[in-house]
Image: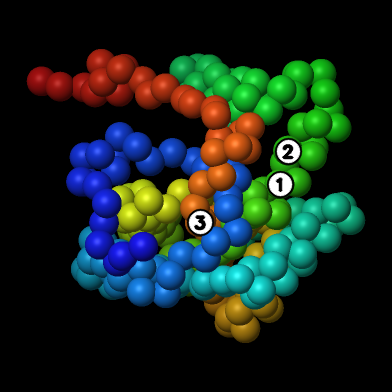
Amino acid sequence: MTASPQMSLIDAIKTRRSVRGYKPDLVPDEVLNNILTLAQKSPSNCNVQPWKVMLATGQECNQLRKQMHDAFASGKPLEADFSTLPKFFGDMKTRQIECAQALYGAMGIERSDKQGRINATAKNYDFFGAPHVLFIGMDKSFSPAIAVDIGMYAQTLMLLMTAHGIGSCAQASTAYYPSIVREFFDTDEDTGILFGISFGYEDDTIAANQARTNRADLSEVLTSK
């Protein structure tokens, strides 16, 4: 595997999706360093580059995975440094349901299978078996306006991963144990954890990776005069 991308930007945009099952193979350091270096080109307000990136690989990833899994399995209360996800409504609620149907359908989990859904949720805290996980944070004093910069950084990062043949999944759920993340990375308390990104080479034998979602037609989101 070389550090050079394998596809164009347009193909990366068309191809990128959430991957929920990985091979154990590590991404070579050269490839990963190249991706993270290029991601620094992401735009931000006044070029402040507010993202704080914490990366765990291999055995370190396994250690953090165990801590996260044990916290969830033991029923440790969920917390968050920033606002949790809102209640969706209208078209957005419909899309949320369709996404859940695609994912659980691919895994063969019925709507009535409560334990099956809990087990599927638990896989978030196992990072879906990924050999790498990174967490993205920002100073707790920053407003949602700065979080927009983090979103642009994350999209740039995941598109670069896709272009290099690497699967990824952005996970808001992994931000519900921010104290575990801060302690693991020895990060100061002023750093708020926004979300994690699990990544590695996709295992296409995993049922969840067969799920596919659609995007709304442009006419549904665009107002033009």
Residue type pointed to by label 1:
Lys
Give the residue at the far left of this rendering: 225
Give the side of residue 20 with respect to residue 216, left or right. right
The 10 Å Cα crowd at callout 1, few under 14, some 14 to 19, many 20 or more, is: some
Quarter in which the C terminus is drawn:
top left
The residue depicted at 36 percent of the width and 62 percent of the height is: 1
| Residue positioned most to the right | 74
Q: Secondary structure at mark 1?
A: helix
- Give how far across and how far down residue 164 sits, in percent: 33, 55
* Residue type, label 3: Gly
Where is residue 140? Give x, y as percent: 52, 68
114, 222: nearer the viewer:
114
Q: Which residue is mark 3?
A: 200
Secondary structure beneath disc 3? strand
Image-quadrant location for residue 89? top right
Q: Is 157 located above or below residue 206 in the figure? A: below
Q: Could you give the CA–CA distance between mark 2 and mark 3, rounded to whole angstroms?
A: 19 Å
Question: Horizontal and vertical percent for residue 39?
Answer: 30, 64
Q: Nearer the viewer, mark 1 or mark 3?
A: 3
Q: Are marks 2 and 1 in contact (CB under 8 Å)?
A: yes
Residue highlighted by disc 2 = 120
